[in-house]
Amino acid sequence: VTDARIAAARGGDARSVARLLSLVENGDPALPGVLTAVTDGRRARVIGLTGSPGVGKSTTTSALVGALRQRGERVAVLAVDPTSPFSGGALLGDRVRMAEHATDPGVFIRSMATRGHLGGLSAAAPQAIRLLEGLGFDTVLVETVGVGQSEIEVAASADTTVVLLAPGMGDGIQAAKAGILEIGDLFVVNKADREGAETTARELRHMVSLGDAAGGSAPWRPPVLLTVASSGQGIAELLTALDAHGAWLADSGAGEQRRQARAAAEIESLALTALRARIDAARLAELAAEVAAGRCDVFSAAEQLVATRG
Ligand SMILES: Nc1nc2c(ncn2[C@@H]2O[C@H](COP(=O)(O)OP(=O)(O)O)[C@@H](O)[C@H]2O)c(=O)[nH]1
Ligand SMILES: [Mg+2]
C-alpha cells in the first residue's frame, strides 16, 4: 500500500500526498518507514515566508506559485499556524487566496495542523518538508502565521527565509524586536500601493545595513524589495532575488552548512526523544527511592539509569 501511495504521490496525486502528510501530523508510527522509502537524494528548494498576519504572505505565496509553475516546477505550499493546535481561521483565508491553484495537479497546498505530534509544529514542519522533498516537489513554500518564537523555528527549516512587512504598521520596529531581522534572507515590503512603503523600505535597509552580513568572504546582504502581491507587481523581481540567494547558498557553501546544521538538530532531537522512551520507569522509581533515602547520590543514580538497558 505504502509503495503504491508513494508512487501515486510522486506522480502528482494530491490525495496520496495528503494521506502521507497526515502521517506527520498525527505522529503516525508508519512515518519513519515512509521517510526511509522516499529518501533517495531528491532535494527541494525550501522557501519560508513569515510576517505578521495580514501583510500579504498568502497572496505573495500564491503569486510565487504562479511564477514557479510557469517554469514547470512542481510546487508544494505548507501553511502552518504554530499558535493553534488545529488549522485555524487564518488559514481559511489562505485557501481563498490560493484558490486559483487548487485544481492544478502540479501544485499541492496544505494547511498544517499538529494533532498529537510530539514536539509540536517545530518538529512536524521539518518532517513534512522532508516528506515533500522525497515526493519530488521542486520547491516547497512554507507560510507561517505571525512573528513569534515558533515562526523563527519554522523559518529555520527553510533554505531561504522571506520576511514580509507592510507599510504603516510600525512594522520595521516590530521586526527588530521580534528578532526577525536575523532570520530574513530577503525582506519584502508588500502593499507598496499604500502610503509609507518607501519609508518602511528605507528604515529596513538601514537596519539591515547595521547587521552582520552572513557568509564571511562572500557575504550576503539581504535585499529589501517592494511588492504589490495582489496585482503581481514586483513578483518577478522577488523570484530573481530568490534565485540569487539560491545561487549564493550553493556557491558559498552556506546552503550545505545550513542543511547539515538543521539535520544535526533534527537528529539530536529525535535521538533524545528515543532515549527518553527507553528509560525504565521501574528502575527510575527504585533509584529515586534510594536517593530519597540518602543511600545514593543523584549523579550515581543517573549513571546507573543510563547504564540500564530498558
Ligand atoms: N492593497 C494591497 N492589499 C494586499 C496586497 N497583498 C495582499 N493584500 C490584501 O491583504 C489582505 C491579507 O492578505 P493575505 O495574503 O491573506 O495576508 P497573510 O495573512 O499575510 O497571509 C488580503 O485582503 C489581500 O487581498 C497588496 O500588495 N496591496
Ligand atoms: Mg496567510
Image (tube, rainbow, N blue to C red):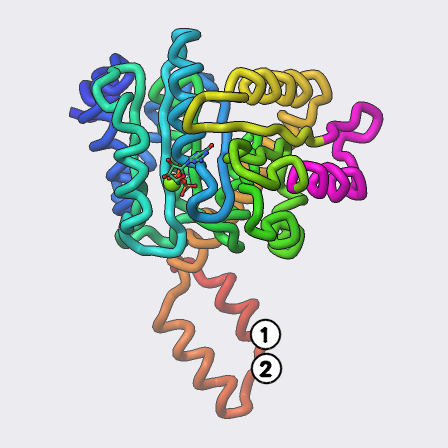
- Residue 137 lies, with reference to residue 224, above or below; the image says above
In the picture provided, is 122 more to the left or to the right than 187? left
Percent from the top left, x then y, of residue 146?
46, 50
Residue at 61% over, 20% down: 241
Residue 226 appears in view: yes
Q: Report the image quarter containing ligand 2.
A: top left
Splitting the image into 4 quarters, where does residue 129 fall? top left
Along the line of sight, the residue nearer the viewer: 52 or 203: 203
> How many angstroms separate mark 1 from mark 2 (CA)?
6 Å
Q: Which mark is residue 300?
A: 1
Circles 1, 2 touching at the beta carbon (< 8 Å): yes
Q: Which residues are magenta?
A: 200-221
Q: Which mark is residue 297?
A: 2
Percent from the top left, x then y, of residue 236?
53, 16
Query: Is 202 one of the magenta-colored residues?
Result: yes
Splitting the image into 4 quarters, where does residue 61 fall? top left
Residue positioned most to the front = 195
Residue at 74% over, 39% down: 208
Residue type at the position of mark 1? Ser
In the structure shown, which secondary structural element does the residue marked by tag 2 occupy?
A: loop
Residue type at the position of mark 2? Asp
Residue 267 appears in view: no
Residue at 18% over, 26% down: 15
